[in-house]
Image (cartoon, rainbow, N blue to C red):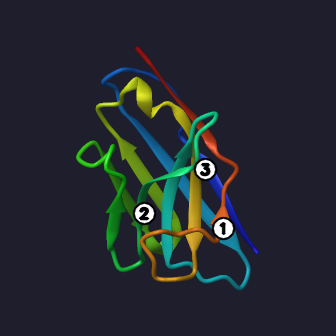
Amino acid sequence: QVQLVESGGGLVQTGGSLRLSCAASGSGFSINAMGWYRQTPGKQRGLVAAITRGGLTNYGASVRGRFTISRDNAKNTVYLQMSSLKPEDTAVYYCVADPRVTIMPSEYWGQGTQVTVSS
């Protein structure tokens, strides 16, 4: 069983920055891909960014150039640096991890952290 613990969400003004963190823990698990999805009420959860253990990245079109995903493999932790934030970035952000080498991780999910961008 894998547990994902997210941190770093909150309220920020338009144009500001936030950094999300997610640490994976558990026993007998193997994680390769990690990433972030986000969801707003009434909409499907969509990929924000993902990264494999080897460093292959995948970004959603709406965040490319503004968000940067990174990870610390030794700590099983993934980070999402969000810059130039817009009100439309407001959502619940979910951390995700997967034992597969994939740019669309989907196996294990965190509880979510709220990001609110005020205009």
Rendered image quadrant of residue 39:
top right
Q: Residue 33 vs residue 113: left or right?
A: left
Q: Secondary structure at mark 3?
A: strand
Which disc is residue 50 wearing?
Answer: 2
The vertical placement of 18 against 61, above or below, is: above
Classify 10 Å Cα crowding around label 1: few (below 14), some (14-19), many (20 and above).
Answer: some
Which disc is residue 108 wearing?
Answer: 1
Q: Amino acid at mark 1?
A: Tyr
Q: Residue furthest right?
A: 1
Q: Position of residue 42 (x, y in %)?
A: 63, 35
Q: Amino acid at mark 2?
A: Ala
Q: Secondary structure at mark 1?
A: strand
Residue situated in front as seen by the camera: 8 or 97:
97
The vertical placement of 10 against 34, above or below, is: above
Residue drawn at x 50%, y 79% as measured from the top left:
32
Q: Which residue is mark 3?
A: 6
Residue drawn at x 76%, y 75% as measured from the top left:
1
Q: Who comes first in sequence, dot 1 or dot 3?
A: 3
Residue drawn at x 31%, y 50% as measured from the top left:
61
Classify 10 Å Cα crowding around label 3: few (below 14), some (14-19), many (20 and above).
Answer: many
Q: Position of residue 50 (x, y in %)?
A: 42, 63
